[in-house]
């Protein structure tokens, strides 16, 4: 909560829609200097407010306030580092250096894994040390940028301060609601869960998110390449053989595969990875998975429509939709928690999962309804009956045979993948070409 979630929530304020503006392949780099300077100014303002009101802020989230000052410093360090790195990641994505933002964003996670593993081996469980590891590791990409000549050559771009025009701002804002909508939803969810149920229950929900992160990885990966590719002057590659459309279809098969694993074996996976103490995380996991399947479809359709739009008015539906749905979602969650609690479903925790999935379904339907170009949907629905048949046959086989979890997961992988490939929904030859496509 302190090392990752709160800095992530505050980063929405410090970075706004800058990543989306910078990732525009033909315009983004012009506004790099403005993004960095404005972002740093917002970091300073947010930091001052956090120092002044930290006790009230932590109390609302049910976080102990005994070490409030220490926690605030850790949050600010992480916030500063992440805010800078996001601007560089957006710049590199716009320049189509896709490996560079990937390196910058994965470095902290990789280092945390190594250091925390070492702490566990040496049985060092100090809360302060672990928080320090999580926060200070966020500075590594920043140091990497300064120390590498390959990356350092872009630093002079900061000197050129050019305020983005209205069209680019609206473009960035609309793409922000595509990229950031699910993240904002999760941050709002965590605020409500932490406030209503406490940090223990927030831990249960975080485990649910961890288990669905494989699906979110596919969503992020597809979105990561969709905007720069579609904003390229020659965006016909979207529908070319081995292009963005085929990559998206392959990733969608991946989403369905892991969704089925989670739906059929949630208790086994939670017990295997986290022990039976966290079995509550598995109870409503299938509901969350359904919402993320819809999110994948929505993200692709919205990304293509926004990236290829010619007029400012084409951006507005998603902006208005996001501004409308997010406040309603906050109240919907509170309402559903109360309804499930009054109906006898425990403390109402199920309402959290139902509200998130409901919102993602509504967001997808809204996007389909107001999209100017619905043609990209054919990526999913062309030969879609073959994908449905693969899912039905695989599910029926698991239900009929009822194998042990590990055997069932292996069977699911083999049967589903074979049916998807040999039915022609995902052509084997094309799949190989996608993997080797540069």
Image (cartoon, rainbow, N blue to C red):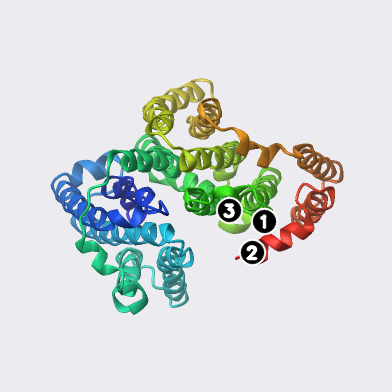
- In the image, residue 10 lies at what x, y percent? 29, 47
Can you say whether 6 is above or below 96 in the image?
above
Name the image quarter holding residue 89.
bottom left
What's the distance in space between the residues labelled 1 and 3, CA to CA?
23 Å
> Which sits in the foreground, 61 or 79?
79
Instruction: Tell us which disc is closer to us: 2 or 3.
Output: 2
Name the residue beneath numbered marker 1. Answer: 242
> Residue 215: in sight, yes or no?
no
Left or right: where 347 falls relative to 71: right
What's the distance in space between the residues labelled 2 and 3, CA to CA?
23 Å
Name the residue beneath numbered marker 3. Answer: 214
Asked whether the beta carbons under mark 1 and mark 3 sit within 8 Å of each other, the answer is no
Counting residues from the N terminus, which is met first, the one under dot 2 or under dot 1?
1
- In the image, residue 277 lies at what x, y percent? 54, 51
What's the distance in space between the residues labelled 2 and 1, CA to CA?
7 Å
In the picture, the disc for residue 437 is 2
In the picture, the disc for residue 334 is none
**Tag 2's secondary structure?**
loop
Asked whether the beta carbons under mark 2 and mark 1 sit within 8 Å of each other, the answer is yes
| Residues packed near mark 3 inside 10 Å, few (<14), some (14 to 19) or many (20 plus) | some
> Which sits in the foreground, 391 or 113?
391
**Tag 1's secondary structure?**
loop
Left or right: where 385 falls relative to 115: right
| Residues packed near mark 1 inside 10 Å, few (<14), some (14 to 19) or many (20 plus) | many
| Residues packed near mark 2 inside 10 Å, few (<14), some (14 to 19) or many (20 plus) | few
> Which sits in the foreground, 92 or 27?
27
């Amino acid at each position: 909560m302190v090392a990752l979630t709160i800095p992530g929530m505050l980063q929405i304020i410090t970075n706004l829609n800058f990543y989306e503006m910078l990732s525009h392949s033909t315009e983004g780099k012009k506004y790099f200097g403005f993004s960095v300077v404005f972002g740093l100014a917002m970091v300073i303002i947010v930091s001052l407010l956090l120092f002044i009101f930290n006790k009230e802020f932590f109390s609302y989230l049910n976080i102990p306030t005994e070490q409030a000052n220490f926690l605030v410093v850790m949050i600010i360090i992480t916030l500063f580092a992440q805010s800078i790195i996001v601007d560089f990641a957006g710049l590199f994505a716009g320049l189509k250096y896709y490996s560079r933002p990937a390196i910058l964003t994965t470095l902290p996670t990789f280092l945390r894994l190594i250091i925390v593993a070492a702490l566990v081996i040496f049985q060092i469980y100090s809360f302060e040390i672990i928080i320090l590891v999580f926060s200070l590791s966020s500075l590594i990409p920043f140091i990497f940028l300064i120390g590498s000549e390959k990356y350092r050559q872009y630093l002079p771009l900061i000197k050129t301060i050019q305020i983005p025009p209205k069209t680019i701002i609206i473009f960035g804002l609309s793409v922000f609601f595509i990229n950031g909508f699910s993240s904002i939803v999760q941050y709002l969810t965590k605020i409500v869960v932490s406030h209503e149920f406490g940090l223990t229950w927030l831990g249960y929900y975080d485990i649910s998110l961890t288990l669905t992160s494989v699906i979110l990885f596919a969503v992020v990966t597809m979105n990561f390449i969709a905007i720069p590719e579609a904003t390229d002057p020659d965006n016909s590659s979207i529908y070319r053989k081995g292009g963005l459309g085929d990559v998206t279809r392959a990733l969608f098969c991946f989403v369905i595969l892991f969704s089925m694993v989670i739906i059929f074996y949630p208790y086994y996976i939670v017990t295997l990875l986290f022990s039976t103490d966290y079995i509550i995380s598995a109870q409503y996991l299938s509901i969350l998975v359904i919402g993320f399947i819809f999110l994948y479809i929505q993200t692709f359709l919205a990304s293509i429509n926004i990236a290829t739009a010619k007029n400012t008015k084409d951006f507005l539906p998603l902006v208005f939709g996001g501004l409308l749905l997010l406040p309603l979602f906050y109240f919907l969650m509170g309402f559903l928690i109360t309804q499930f609690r009054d109906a006898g479903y425990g403390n109402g925790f199920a309402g959290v999962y139902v509200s998130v999935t409901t919102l993602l379904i509504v967001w997808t339907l809204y996007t389909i309804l107001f999209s100017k170009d619905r043609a990209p949907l054919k990526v999913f629905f062309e030969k879609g009956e073959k994908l449905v048949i693969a899912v039905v046959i695989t599910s029926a086989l698991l239900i009929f045979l009822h194998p042990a979890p590990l055997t069932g997961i292996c069977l699911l992988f083999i049967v589903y993948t074979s049916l998807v490939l040999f039915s022609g929904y995902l052509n084997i030859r094309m799949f190989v070409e996608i993997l080797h496509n540069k």
